[in-house]
Amino acid sequence: MTDRNLDAVTGAFSFTGGFIARRLLAAGRRVRTLTNHPHRPGAEEMEVDVTPLQFEDREALIQSLRGVDVLYNTYWIRFPHAGIGFGDAVANTRRLIGAAAEAGVRKVVHISVSNPSADSPLDYYSGKARAEAIVRESGLAWAVVRPTLIFGQGDILLNNIAWLLRRMPVFLVPGNGAYRLQPVAGDDVADIAIWAAGLTDSVTVDAAGPDIMSYAELVDSIAIAIHHTRRIVFTPPALTLLAARVVGRSVNDVVLTPQELDGLMDELLVSKEPPRGTSRIDDWLLRNSDTLGTKYASELDRHFRRPL
Ligand SMILES: NC(=O)c1ccc[n+]([C@@H]2O[C@H](COP(=O)([O-])OP(=O)(O)OC[C@H]3O[C@@H](n4cnc5c(N)ncnc54)[C@H](OP(=O)(O)O)[C@@H]3O)[C@@H](O)[C@H]2O)c1
């Protein structure tokens, strides 16, 4: 039988899922997380049931979702790696949503991205559009939440911009740096997701913050907050990507992909809706100025290397 007080969250010990799980727990909900990293730092502080996110074992996946009221699905990949591409991420999403329907989950709140499009030349965004379609056609009640760029404890991109600013004599900005983005706080994304879970109607909403700024302004804000202002050098995008590859080799990670850069420069991280998020990125930068960028945050360590 479905326990109306139990929700499932993918990746409660990772980034976005962590904000959602913490908000649900604070609201008195019980939480089960589906994750392949059950021992990440901080996991012990969260009172959640833990079960693997196993796409290959349909019965086990269904079992892990039995009794769940709402599934908050954050699963996706940032870039293709180790033989897993965006097509696989779409297929895995289909398996997960199919298992949720089979298990009797009442509603799925699916975390997507701002401006997905089936016609997009960027696989991340076209894959996201396909994943959204799977959710809408699942027969479950659904909500799709589309964040822009998420900031908060555990983020990778902003942390690594700060890391570079702390270490490098100059900072490379691709193109003219005037393309805009609209960051949103992880806590605001969680609030929007939980609000959407409570709606009777199925909805698709953006999760975007109150400030729209250019990329160059964002880099400036980070530099000022951490007291490491650097000379900004505007470079052709290909040169920035080359530099990112060189840095990536030294830290053994993928720092920035060409598609991520295209999405950023095409302003796909800007919402066309009135913002639902209220937290200002500058406040967060100032509150976290001592720690932001002191350590490099590795995507490959987080998801591919260290089986924490
Ligand atoms: N981060 C942003 O700024 C941002 C912006 C817009 C939209 N989004 C969307 O928000 C959602 C969550 O993003 P996030 O950055 O917060 O991700 P995340 O927490 O790092 O990962 C989310 C979930 O996906 C799983 N996962 C990630 N990469 C994987 C891989 N290569 N193989 C298997 N499982 C993998 C994680 O598994 P584990 O639990 O085992 O780690 C976790 O359950 C995604 O749908 C993303 O597209 C994020």
Image: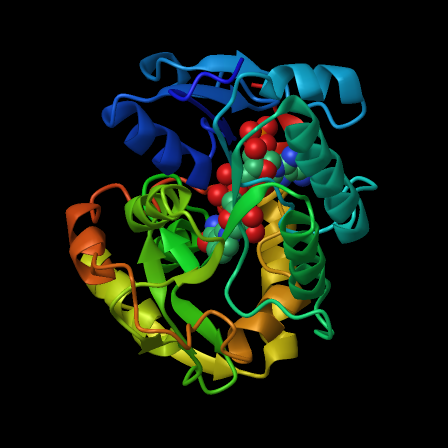
Quick check: 125 left or right of 209?
right
**Considering the image in quadrants, where does the N terminus appear?**
top right
| Residue at 59 percent of width and 61 percent of height | 244
Count of number-bearing discs: 0
Rendered location of residue 46, percent (x, y): 35, 17
Rendered location of residue 152, percent (x, y): 32, 46
Rendered location of residue 275, percent (x, y): 30, 68
Quick check: 293 left or right of 92?
left
Residue 147 visible, this orientation: no
Residue found at the far right of this picture: 83
Decide: is 212 above or below 132: below
Rendered location of residue 87, percent (x, y): 80, 51
Decide: is 49 above or below 154: above
Quick check: 193 left or right of 304?
left
**Considering the image in quadrants, where does the C terminus appear?**
top right
| Residue at 32 percent of width and 29 percent of height | 24
Asked which quadrant contains residue 29, the reply is: top left
Quick check: 175 left or right of 278?
right
Asked which quadrant contains residue 20, the reply is: top left
The one nearer the camera, 256 or 249, is 256
| Residue at 58 percent of width and 71 percent of height | 263
| Residue at 68 percent of width and 44 percent of height | 138
Residue 294 visible, this orientation: yes
Asked which quadrant contains residue 187, the reply is: top left
Quadrant containing ligand 1: top right
Decide: is 133 above or below 108: below
The one nearer the camera, 173 or 155, is 155
